[in-house]
Image (cartoon, helix red, strand yellow):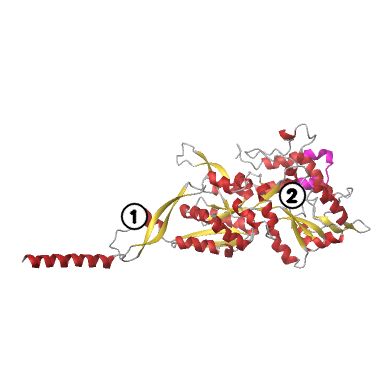
Amino acid sequence: MRPFKKLLDSAAKLLCVALLLSTVGAGCTQGPDAATAAASKKVEINVWGVIDDEAAYDAIFKDYRALHPNVTINFRRFTLEEYEDQLLNAMAEDRGPDIFMIHNTWVGKYMPKILPMPLQTKTALESIQGTLKKELVWTLVTQPTVSIRQFKLDYPDAVLGDMLRTVNVSTNPDKKDMQTRVVGIPLSVDTLAMYANKDLLNAAGISTVPQNWDDFQTAVKKLVKLDDQGNILQAGAGLGLGSNVERASDIIIDLMMQNGAEMSTADGTPTFTQIPAKLQGQRDVPPAEQALQFYTDFANPSKDVYTWNAKMPNSLNAFIQGKSAFFFGYGYDLPAIRTGAPQLNLGISQMPQITGNPVVNYANYWAYTVSKKTKNPDISWDLLNFMRKPEENKKFLDVAQRPAALRSQLNTQLDNEDIGVFASQVLTAQSWYRGNDPAAMNSAFVQLIEDAQTTDPEKYMTIINVAAEKVAQTIPSGGI
């Protein structure tokens, strides 16, 4: 009987093995724990943006879904004109996106709606395991997000001032825990530069594009053409006014900063009405006043650099129409110029600077952030951290043709005919506004320029102080 018993025992063992092998991957192995099961459920992440179409992000989203097949990414692009209204209405009705775009001057305004980046995220990754029979297994992975130290190494100064904020991360309503956190991830950074109509420069005998403001003034005098009644037939550049000059507030602010003005304190309080401590004894008037005088001279018929007036069209349209030799704009203006004037002999050069002063450029960019109302905070911030990886970010830049936000990618763009100039200025670009009403700030500077047309230059400080007071009213009580 003993041999027969051994035979039965062997048969039983073989049967058990066969049953085990037949059930691998069919539910008889130990399933995922509750946290992993929750993280691996199918989820949709809604991303809202402006400027670029979904095609610019296709490669990144495809790469992310390869790692997270349970995640569907829905991207929706809006026009700039409709974006804020749609965003605010959707947020008010709790149907807003998980991830949304903010302009770098909007950070203060949207801080109450932003979920700062956590120190780590937990997401489910799918992998193939097993030797005899392969099976798909979900694993809950905890990954650190980009550290503050690394963020400072990766991005230019303009981004650090905007996207690093001190926030209360305490979950205890009776206790504060103030920490510096990342609140947004930019994929590119644009800068203010100078477009030139090289045919008009050639006709005027100007062989090189001006690199400083002294040479720029000289060039303008050669370029402007007036009829017998003093009407402008050809302008040197759209400068001097606020209403019909594209991004007039950015231009005057850049001039102020180039001239040494310190726009505000760290908490956002406007200080551009003052002579900075470093210039005490060297200047008799604040740098902002000198910058305003310099700028408005271009729209003053009594000045030899007179080149612009209220009868002229918008400065971008004037440039496209061949009525102006120079235009101050951003990289994002290039498609409109190419479309509107395909035969234009176009040149793009760096923003003119003040000879002898440190180089200062002006930053203008968008960043992605996560909504405080998202139901998927870990996946949302994990996606943004994935998008900022150099190899992924580059896929966006190659399609969108925009200057990089990451320091490590700027040198590779310098020889690019379209974006090289803008990329070359990113490291010297500044961003200053930290209030919560960017539209009011912009209006204050445009109004300052307009008020200067009817104000005695000796009283410019009066209207500059008014502009500063308007900006101060947009700063939250107690500062940032």
Tell me which segment is drawn in magenta.
445-462
Residue shown at the point (61%, 38%) measured from the top left: 479
Q: Is residue 45 visible?
A: yes
Give percent across and percent down for residue 376: 46, 54
Give percent across and percent down for residue 277: 71, 33
Left or right, 392 with respect to 350, comes to left
Left or right, 11 with respect to 248, comes to left
What is the three-letter code of the residue carrying label 2?
Ile
Nearer-the-camera pick, 287 or 451:
287
Residue beneath label 1, please? 33
Q: Is residue 17 above or below residue 91?
A: below
Q: Which mark is residue 439?
A: none
Nearer-the-camera pick, 199 or 27:
199
Residue shown at the point (77%, 53%) measured from the top left: 243
**Magenta segment includes 458:** yes
Q: Which mark is residue 251?
A: 2
The quarter of the rendered structure image containing the N terminus is bottom left
